[in-house]
Amino acid sequence: MLSYQHAFHAGNLADLQKHALLAELLSYLTKKDKPLTYIETHAGRGLYDLTSDEAVKTGEAAQGIGAHAGIFRPDHPYLAALEAVRREHGPNAYPGSPLIASKLLRPNDKIHLAELHPQEHQALTLALRAPNVTLHRQDGFALAHSLCPPEPRRGVLLVDPPYELKQDYVEIPKFFRQINKKWNVGVLALWYPILSSAAHVPMLAALTENFPDALCHEIRFPPVREKHRMIGSGMFVVNPPWGLSEAASALTDRLRRAKAAR
Ligand code: SAM
Protein backbone atom coordinates (compact mmCIF):
# COMPACT_ATOMS: atom_id res chain seq x y z
CA MET A 1 0.00 0.00 0.00
CA LEU A 2 1.34 3.43 -0.93
CA SER A 3 1.49 5.82 2.01
CA TYR A 4 4.21 8.31 1.00
CA GLN A 5 2.92 11.80 0.20
CA HIS A 6 5.35 14.30 -1.22
CA ALA A 7 3.23 17.26 0.00
CA PHE A 8 4.95 16.89 3.41
CA HIS A 9 8.38 17.31 1.83
CA ALA A 10 7.89 19.48 -1.30
CA GLY A 11 10.37 22.33 -1.50
CA ASN A 12 12.75 20.91 1.12
CA LEU A 13 16.53 20.93 0.66
CA ALA A 14 16.46 17.54 -1.04
CA ASP A 15 13.90 18.84 -3.56
CA LEU A 16 15.98 21.97 -4.05
CA GLN A 17 19.02 19.86 -5.00
CA LYS A 18 17.03 17.50 -7.25
CA HIS A 19 15.03 20.24 -8.96
CA ALA A 20 17.96 22.64 -9.41
CA LEU A 21 20.06 19.92 -11.09
CA LEU A 22 17.10 18.72 -13.16
CA ALA A 23 16.51 22.28 -14.36
CA GLU A 24 20.19 22.73 -15.28
CA LEU A 25 20.22 19.37 -17.04
CA LEU A 26 17.16 20.24 -19.14
CA SER A 27 18.47 23.68 -19.93
CA TYR A 28 21.73 22.16 -21.29
CA LEU A 29 19.83 19.60 -23.36
CA THR A 30 17.43 22.16 -24.84
CA LYS A 31 20.30 24.26 -26.18
CA LYS A 32 20.12 21.97 -29.23
CA ASP A 33 17.02 22.23 -31.44
CA LYS A 34 16.53 18.45 -31.64
CA PRO A 35 13.48 17.25 -29.68
CA LEU A 36 13.71 15.26 -26.46
CA THR A 37 11.79 12.64 -24.54
CA TYR A 38 11.37 13.19 -20.78
CA ILE A 39 10.23 10.19 -18.75
CA GLU A 40 9.56 10.27 -15.02
CA THR A 41 8.91 7.03 -13.14
CA HIS A 42 7.59 8.58 -9.87
CA ALA A 43 5.95 11.90 -10.74
CA GLY A 44 4.03 12.94 -7.63
CA ARG A 45 1.22 15.50 -7.90
CA GLY A 46 3.17 18.10 -9.88
CA LEU A 47 2.00 21.19 -7.98
CA TYR A 48 2.27 21.87 -4.23
CA ASP A 49 0.93 24.57 -1.92
CA LEU A 50 3.54 25.54 0.65
CA THR A 51 0.81 26.85 2.97
CA SER A 52 -0.95 23.44 3.03
CA ASP A 53 -1.34 21.64 6.37
CA GLU A 54 1.19 19.03 5.22
CA ALA A 55 3.89 21.58 4.35
CA VAL A 56 3.31 23.65 7.48
CA LYS A 57 3.32 20.55 9.69
CA THR A 58 6.86 19.53 8.74
CA GLY A 59 8.26 23.00 8.04
CA GLU A 60 10.60 21.38 5.50
CA ALA A 61 9.86 23.85 2.69
CA ALA A 62 10.59 26.76 5.02
CA GLN A 63 14.07 25.33 5.63
CA GLY A 64 14.50 24.54 1.94
CA ILE A 65 13.29 26.85 -0.81
CA GLY A 66 11.92 29.29 1.80
CA ALA A 67 15.41 29.94 3.16
CA HIS A 68 17.50 29.34 0.03
CA ALA A 69 15.80 30.86 -3.06
CA GLY A 70 18.35 33.69 -2.83
CA ILE A 71 21.39 31.46 -3.39
CA PHE A 72 20.66 31.01 -7.11
CA ARG A 73 21.94 33.27 -9.84
CA PRO A 74 18.99 35.30 -11.20
CA ASP A 75 18.93 33.50 -14.55
CA HIS A 76 19.02 29.98 -13.05
CA PRO A 77 16.50 27.75 -14.89
CA TYR A 78 15.15 26.43 -11.55
CA LEU A 79 14.18 29.98 -10.57
CA ALA A 80 12.73 30.56 -14.05
CA ALA A 81 10.46 27.49 -13.65
CA LEU A 82 9.56 28.42 -10.05
CA GLU A 83 8.66 31.98 -11.04
CA ALA A 84 6.63 30.84 -14.05
CA VAL A 85 4.59 28.53 -11.79
CA ARG A 86 4.15 31.23 -9.13
CA ARG A 87 2.92 33.69 -11.76
CA GLU A 88 0.17 31.20 -12.64
CA HIS A 89 -0.63 29.75 -9.21
CA GLY A 90 0.40 32.35 -6.66
CA PRO A 91 3.43 33.03 -4.46
CA ASN A 92 3.02 29.92 -2.26
CA ALA A 93 2.99 27.44 -5.13
CA TYR A 94 5.88 25.03 -5.57
CA PRO A 95 6.43 23.00 -8.74
CA GLY A 96 7.26 19.32 -8.56
CA SER A 97 9.65 17.85 -11.09
CA PRO A 98 6.95 17.24 -13.77
CA LEU A 99 5.98 20.91 -13.74
CA ILE A 100 9.60 22.05 -13.75
CA ALA A 101 10.21 19.83 -16.78
CA SER A 102 7.10 21.07 -18.57
CA LYS A 103 8.14 24.71 -18.04
CA LEU A 104 11.63 24.12 -19.45
CA LEU A 105 10.83 21.74 -22.31
CA ARG A 106 9.41 22.74 -25.70
CA PRO A 107 6.10 21.82 -27.40
CA ASN A 108 7.85 19.29 -29.66
CA ASP A 109 9.46 17.47 -26.70
CA LYS A 110 7.51 14.50 -25.35
CA ILE A 111 6.78 14.07 -21.64
CA HIS A 112 5.71 10.75 -20.06
CA LEU A 113 4.87 10.67 -16.35
CA ALA A 114 4.03 7.66 -14.17
CA GLU A 115 2.24 8.07 -10.84
CA LEU A 116 0.64 5.10 -9.12
CA HIS A 117 -1.19 6.70 -6.18
CA PRO A 118 -4.83 7.45 -7.20
CA GLN A 119 -5.05 10.84 -5.45
CA GLU A 120 -1.62 12.00 -6.56
CA HIS A 121 -2.40 10.87 -10.10
CA GLN A 122 -5.71 12.75 -10.05
CA ALA A 123 -3.97 15.91 -8.80
CA LEU A 124 -1.34 15.53 -11.51
CA THR A 125 -4.03 15.38 -14.22
CA LEU A 126 -5.25 18.79 -12.96
CA ALA A 127 -1.76 20.29 -12.60
CA LEU A 128 -0.43 19.33 -15.98
CA ARG A 129 -2.45 19.45 -19.18
CA ALA A 130 -0.57 19.89 -22.43
CA PRO A 131 -0.68 18.12 -25.76
CA ASN A 132 2.90 16.85 -25.37
CA VAL A 133 2.26 15.29 -21.91
CA THR A 134 1.08 11.69 -21.38
CA LEU A 135 0.15 10.62 -17.85
CA HIS A 136 0.30 6.96 -16.89
CA ARG A 137 -1.27 5.49 -13.76
CA GLN A 138 1.07 2.55 -13.61
CA ASP A 139 4.31 1.36 -12.07
CA GLY A 140 7.03 3.74 -13.22
CA PHE A 141 9.71 1.08 -13.63
CA ALA A 142 7.38 -0.91 -15.91
CA LEU A 143 6.55 2.24 -17.87
CA ALA A 144 10.24 2.97 -18.46
CA HIS A 145 10.81 -0.59 -19.66
CA SER A 146 7.90 -0.29 -22.10
CA LEU A 147 8.97 3.11 -23.49
CA CYS A 148 12.74 2.72 -23.79
CA PRO A 149 14.31 3.36 -26.18
CA PRO A 150 11.87 6.22 -26.69
CA GLU A 151 11.21 8.35 -29.74
CA PRO A 152 12.69 11.02 -29.86
CA ARG A 153 15.88 9.19 -28.89
CA ARG A 154 17.53 12.09 -27.07
CA GLY A 155 16.20 12.49 -23.59
CA VAL A 156 16.08 12.04 -19.86
CA LEU A 157 14.70 9.49 -17.42
CA LEU A 158 14.20 10.74 -13.86
CA VAL A 159 13.78 8.08 -11.17
CA ASP A 160 12.63 9.50 -7.84
CA PRO A 161 11.04 6.73 -5.76
CA PRO A 162 9.92 7.20 -2.16
CA TYR A 163 12.09 4.20 -1.10
CA GLU A 164 9.17 2.87 0.98
CA LEU A 165 10.01 -0.53 -0.48
CA LYS A 166 13.48 -1.48 0.71
CA GLN A 167 13.71 -3.71 -2.36
CA ASP A 168 14.08 -0.56 -4.49
CA TYR A 169 17.65 -0.17 -3.18
CA VAL A 170 18.44 -3.62 -4.55
CA GLU A 171 16.50 -3.40 -7.82
CA ILE A 172 17.53 0.07 -9.00
CA PRO A 173 21.11 -0.80 -10.10
CA LYS A 174 19.71 -3.69 -12.18
CA PHE A 175 17.00 -1.41 -13.57
CA PHE A 176 19.60 1.21 -14.57
CA ARG A 177 21.73 -1.47 -16.30
CA GLN A 178 18.74 -2.76 -18.25
CA ILE A 179 17.52 0.67 -19.35
CA ASN A 180 21.04 1.79 -20.31
CA LYS A 181 21.42 -1.36 -22.42
CA LYS A 182 18.24 -0.53 -24.35
CA TRP A 183 18.82 3.24 -24.43
CA ASN A 184 22.53 3.95 -24.29
CA VAL A 185 22.19 7.64 -25.19
CA GLY A 186 19.57 8.39 -22.53
CA VAL A 187 20.46 10.58 -19.58
CA LEU A 188 19.40 8.50 -16.55
CA ALA A 189 19.02 10.46 -13.30
CA LEU A 190 18.35 8.95 -9.89
CA TRP A 191 17.54 10.81 -6.68
CA TYR A 192 18.33 9.05 -3.41
CA PRO A 193 18.18 9.95 0.27
CA ILE A 194 21.29 9.87 2.44
CA LEU A 195 20.11 8.21 5.63
CA SER A 196 21.89 7.90 8.95
CA SER A 197 21.51 4.12 8.47
CA ALA A 198 23.58 4.39 5.23
CA ALA A 199 20.91 2.27 3.48
CA HIS A 200 21.81 3.87 0.14
CA VAL A 201 25.51 2.87 0.24
CA PRO A 202 25.34 -0.62 -1.35
CA MET A 203 23.00 0.71 -4.08
CA LEU A 204 25.40 3.54 -4.85
CA ALA A 205 28.38 1.18 -4.89
CA ALA A 206 26.61 -1.08 -7.41
CA LEU A 207 25.64 1.91 -9.57
CA THR A 208 29.16 3.34 -9.49
CA GLU A 209 30.67 0.00 -10.43
CA ASN A 210 28.42 -0.16 -13.50
CA PHE A 211 28.65 3.50 -14.43
CA PRO A 212 32.09 4.77 -13.37
CA ASP A 213 31.72 7.94 -15.48
CA ALA A 214 28.38 8.97 -13.99
CA LEU A 215 27.99 12.20 -12.05
CA CYS A 216 27.31 11.73 -8.37
CA HIS A 217 26.39 14.85 -6.44
CA GLU A 218 25.53 14.85 -2.74
CA ILE A 219 24.55 17.50 -0.24
CA ARG A 220 24.37 17.12 3.52
CA PHE A 221 22.02 18.88 5.89
CA PRO A 222 20.94 18.52 9.51
CA PRO A 223 17.91 16.28 10.18
CA VAL A 224 14.74 18.36 9.79
CA ARG A 225 13.56 17.20 13.20
CA GLU A 226 14.79 15.13 16.09
CA LYS A 227 15.29 11.47 15.20
CA HIS A 228 14.66 12.17 11.48
CA ARG A 229 16.93 9.81 9.59
CA MET A 230 17.57 11.82 6.41
CA ILE A 231 20.85 13.73 6.64
CA GLY A 232 21.41 14.53 3.00
CA SER A 233 20.45 13.74 -0.57
CA GLY A 234 22.10 12.63 -3.75
CA MET A 235 21.70 12.68 -7.51
CA PHE A 236 23.35 10.02 -9.67
CA VAL A 237 23.35 10.89 -13.38
CA VAL A 238 24.41 8.54 -16.16
CA ASN A 239 25.46 10.34 -19.40
CA PRO A 240 25.41 13.80 -17.75
CA PRO A 241 25.40 16.63 -20.28
CA TRP A 242 28.51 18.75 -20.55
CA GLY A 243 28.42 21.49 -17.90
CA LEU A 244 26.29 19.63 -15.35
CA SER A 245 29.26 18.72 -13.17
CA GLU A 246 30.27 22.41 -12.88
CA ALA A 247 26.65 23.35 -12.15
CA ALA A 248 26.54 20.75 -9.36
CA SER A 249 29.79 22.07 -7.84
CA ALA A 250 28.41 25.62 -8.00
CA LEU A 251 25.31 24.46 -6.10
CA THR A 252 27.50 22.92 -3.38
CA ASP A 253 29.49 26.17 -3.08
CA ARG A 254 26.42 28.34 -2.87
CA LEU A 255 24.80 26.13 -0.22
CA ARG A 256 28.08 26.14 1.75
CA ARG A 257 28.32 29.95 1.60
CA ALA A 258 24.67 30.29 2.68
CA LYS A 259 25.36 28.01 5.66
CA ALA A 260 28.50 29.94 6.63
CA ALA A 261 26.58 33.25 6.45
CA ARG A 262 24.00 32.07 9.04
N1 SAM B 1 9.39 13.39 -8.45
C1 SAM B 1 8.46 14.18 -7.65
C2 SAM B 1 8.99 15.58 -7.51
O1 SAM B 1 10.22 15.77 -7.37
O2 SAM B 1 8.19 16.53 -7.56
C3 SAM B 1 8.24 13.56 -6.30
C4 SAM B 1 7.88 12.11 -6.34
S1 SAM B 1 7.62 11.39 -4.77
C5 SAM B 1 9.22 11.33 -4.09
C6 SAM B 1 7.34 9.71 -5.20
C7 SAM B 1 5.99 9.43 -5.83
O3 SAM B 1 6.02 8.10 -6.37
C8 SAM B 1 4.80 9.42 -4.88
O4 SAM B 1 3.84 10.35 -5.34
C9 SAM B 1 4.24 8.00 -4.94
O5 SAM B 1 2.82 7.94 -4.90
C10 SAM B 1 4.74 7.52 -6.28
N2 SAM B 1 4.95 6.07 -6.42
C11 SAM B 1 5.33 5.17 -5.49
N3 SAM B 1 5.59 3.98 -6.07
C12 SAM B 1 5.38 4.13 -7.40
C13 SAM B 1 5.54 3.29 -8.52
N4 SAM B 1 5.94 2.02 -8.38
N5 SAM B 1 5.29 3.78 -9.74
C14 SAM B 1 4.87 5.06 -9.90
N6 SAM B 1 4.71 5.92 -8.87
C15 SAM B 1 4.97 5.47 -7.64
Image: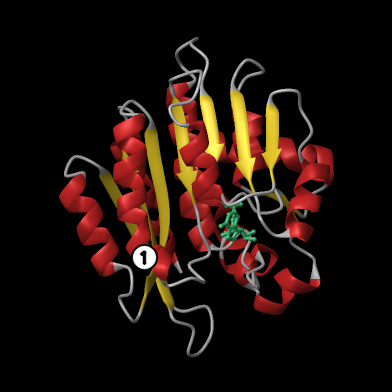
Question: Residue 79's x, y, as percent?
Answer: 59, 40
Q: Residue at x 38, y 33 (%)?
A: 187
- Residue at (37% x, 39% y) in the render: 179
Where 237 sits versus 202, above or below? above
Give the side of residue 153 with respect to residue 64, left or right.
left
Q: Is residue 93 above or below residue 259?
A: above
Circle 1 packing at 10 Å, graded few (<14), some (14-19), many (20+), is: many
SS at mark 1?
helix
Please provide percent x and percent y for residue 169.
36, 65
Q: Is residue 141 visible?
A: yes
In which quadrant of this rendering is ligand 1 seen?
bottom right
Instruction: Note whether residue 239 is visible.
Output: no
Going by the picture, which residue comes out furthest to the top? Answer: 33
Q: Point out the residue furthest to the bottom here.
A: 227
In the picture of the structure, the residue carrying the numbered disc 1 is: 169
Amino acid at dot 1 = Tyr
Compared with 48, 229 (above or below) is below
Provide residue 117's location: percent of width, then percent of height: 70, 60
> Residue at position x 26%, y 60% from top?
204
**Residue sitting at x 48%, y 11%:** 34
